[in-house]
Image (cartoon, coloured by chain):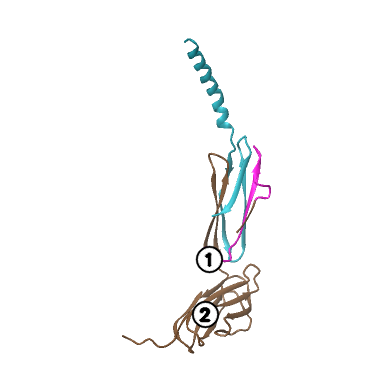
Chain colours: A cyan, B brown
Amino acid sequence: MKRFPCLFMIFLISILLICPRISYCAPRAFIQNTVYDAGDVPQGKEISNEFTLKNTGDQPLTFKVRPC
Amino acid sequence: MEISAPGGQTIAPGDAGKIIVKMSTGPFTNDLFKEVKVETNDPKADLIVLTMKAKVTEMLKISPRLVNFGRMMKGQTASREISVENVSESSIRITRLEATPENLLAVQPSEPFTLKPGQSKKLTVKISTGSSGGFVGGYVNLETNLEYLPKKTVHVRVEVKEKQESAR
């Protein structure tokens, strides 16, 4: 009977050790400026912008882009 | 709209990738607002919305943009004026004027012309309804010497009736 609290304590400590690891093991997507305002543009002229997507996490970040 | 990710669609931890968005302002007047969705495997940011904004200024103002002849009888002819104004700061040459369908529509003058900054010109759109009834849609194209505005289109509409509707 005395073994149960002991096993429970080991389980609890293991969870506490694993949990932070789980929360950090993820990709993190970060884009500084998500809005690009080109200002006044003559009709017909092309506008373009380069958005920088940074992975601040510790796992590879995958992404797909599509127009709305 | 053209979207590209030149570095691929996977970014290693600590690295950065590029998303290039290109779009023409051609079909827009006044406010341009377009969004691009970025779907990621980040559990906390699985959808990021990128926004492209601009205030599109017309170089060549055409009024009206739609010529509606309303209801006409078969075999009738009618004409409407449209105004073309150069609101840019440099000369614009209209290199070609074309009305389609050719058997029903015509634009006059049909010769190329140049508009100096601030200058405007009236054009006449003529329609001959022909022998078939129903809704007819056409357009007048004005081709320009502007690299980023090769063409401006004026749409034309008419409803051709078989015979005069009697008043009740």
Q: Residue furthest right?
A: B7
Q: Is residue B74 left or right of residue A34?
A: left
Q: Is residue B104 above or below residue B53?
A: below
Q: Quadrant of residue B154?
A: bottom right
Q: Amino acid at mark 1?
A: Thr
Question: Which residue ends up furthest to the left in the rendered image?
Answer: B168
Nearer to the camera, A22 or B114 = A22
The residue located at (60%, 48%) in the rendering is A64
> Which residue is the site of mark 1?
B29
Circle 2 crowding by C-alpha within 10 Å: few under 14, some 14–19, many from 20: some
In screen coordinates, is B78 left or right of B4? Answer: left
Where residue B75 sits: x, y (%)?
49, 89
Q: Label 1: how many residues lie within 10 Å, few (<14), some (14-19) or many (20+)?
A: some
Q: Quadrant of residue B165?
A: bottom left
Percent coordinates x, y for residue A66 in the rendering: 58, 53
Chain for numbered disc 2: B
Taking the magenta stretch, the answer to whether it contains residue B165 is no
- The region drawn magenta spans B5-30
Q: Residue at x 53, y 85 (%)?
A: B126
Q: Secondary structure at mark 2?
A: strand
Q: CA distance from mark 2 to mark 1?
A: 18 Å
Q: Quadrant of the C terminus of chain B?
A: bottom left
Mark 2 lies on residue? B82
Please say if A31 is above or below A58: below
Do discs 2 and 1 belong to a common subunit? Answer: yes
User: Which residue ends up furthest to the bottom in the rendered image?
Assistant: B75
Of B94 and B42, nearer the camera is B42
Could you tell whether B7 is left or right of B25 in the image? right
Is B18 one of the magenta-colored residues?
A: yes
In the image, what residue occupies the spot 57% across and 46% down? B39
